[in-house]
Image: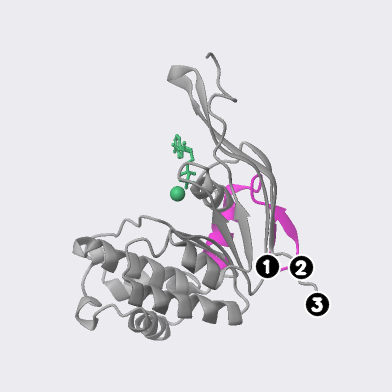
Amino acid sequence: MTVAPILRLENFCKNFALHEQDKVIPSSAQVNLSVYPGRLTALIGPTGSGKSSVLNGIYRTYLTSSGRILYRCAAGEEIDLARADDHDILALRRSEIGFVTQFLHFLPRQKTEDVVAQPLYQQGVDKEEARARARATLEALNLPRRLWSLSPTTFSGGEKQRVNLARGLTARPRLLLLDEPTASLDPRTCQRVVAQIKSLKKANIAMLAIFHQMDLVKQLADEVVELSPAAEGVMGGQP
Ligand SMILES: Nc1ncnc2c1ncn2[C@@H]1O[C@H](COP(=O)(O)OP(=O)(O)O)[C@@H](O)[C@H]1O
Ligand SMILES: [Mg+2]
């Protein structure tokens, strides 16, 4: 059985222009990859090889320098996320594409369970139902119950990371982007995350993920794409 990809990157490139220094910093160079429903594509490569820039390009936190990001929407049409208008991107973020970033900034005074349920509120899910789903994920990721009614602003790194992940996992988007979601978690909690990701695969969710630990790549990846470090100065202005 051949499954059609939900996302295809064709020659994706990202450079950062430092105008004041008249320099261009190459980040991701000529990235080609596909992501499929119910499967996980892992992005690997050394620090600075442009892995996070790929995810930011897809989510449009960064503008793409060149190449195409072809995403097949729930409605069936294919759109190029590199060129789609902001309005369409915001709509997709609300309903179809989730991103667990490396660092999430929490609003002060917002309860953890509301932080986690927020994407569901935005999708119009009933508040009680959304909170129940948020609590189930927090439980699955082993975040102590006494923290659920507090704001994550003062939590430890590992606790914050669990809240951030719980938010992405609870939303159950069609495409989930994960940027080192387990970097500050202990091995037992990592295994709980593995179980959650496996259950998302069963729910036919497509994932593109960067993992700090290679054993997680081995356990979870159906496809592995390796980025090489961008060649220093290749895109540069003056030497
Ligand atoms: N916002 C930015 N402004 C300037 N340079 C950036 C920015 N984000 C990333 N870079 C540069 O792009 C390169 C790739 O970064 P990144 O995508 O974070 O790589 P990785 O996730 O593989 O470590 C690095 O050289 C980094 O310094
Ligand atoms: Mg990174």
Q: Report whether 85 appears left or right of 16.
A: right
Residue 134, position in %: x, y? 38, 79
Residue 13 against residue 112 in the figure, above or below: above
Residue that badge 2 annotates = 4
Label 2 close to label 1 by CB (< 8 Å)? yes
Residue type of the residue flagged with mark 3 = Met
Q: Quadrant of the N terminus?
A: bottom right
Q: Which mark is residue 36?
A: 1
Q: Are marks 1 and 3 in contact (CB under 8 Å)?
A: no
Q: Is residue 127 above or below residue 219?
A: below
Question: Between 208 and 126, which is closer to the camera in this rendering?
Answer: 208
Tell me: is circle 3 under 8 Å from ligand 1: no
Residue with the mark numbered 3: 1
- Image quadrant in which you'd find residue 158: bottom left
- Asked whether residue 77 is drawn in magenta, I would say yes
The answer to whether residue 118 shows anywhere in this view is no
Residue 236 placement: quadrant = top right
Where residue 229 sits in the image (x, y, percent)? Answer: 54, 39
- Mark pair 2, 1: CA separation: 7 Å
Q: Would residue 217 appear left or right of 134 to someone viewing this image? A: right
Residue type at mark 2? Ala
Using the numbered discs, state the Cα–Cα distance from disc 1 to disc 3 in whole angstroms.
Answer: 13 Å
Point out the stretch of residues depicted in magenta. Answer: 71-96
Residue, x 26% and y 71% (percent of image)?
111
* Residue drawn at 40 percent across, 68 percent down: 165
Q: Position of residue 125 (x, y in %)?
A: 47, 79
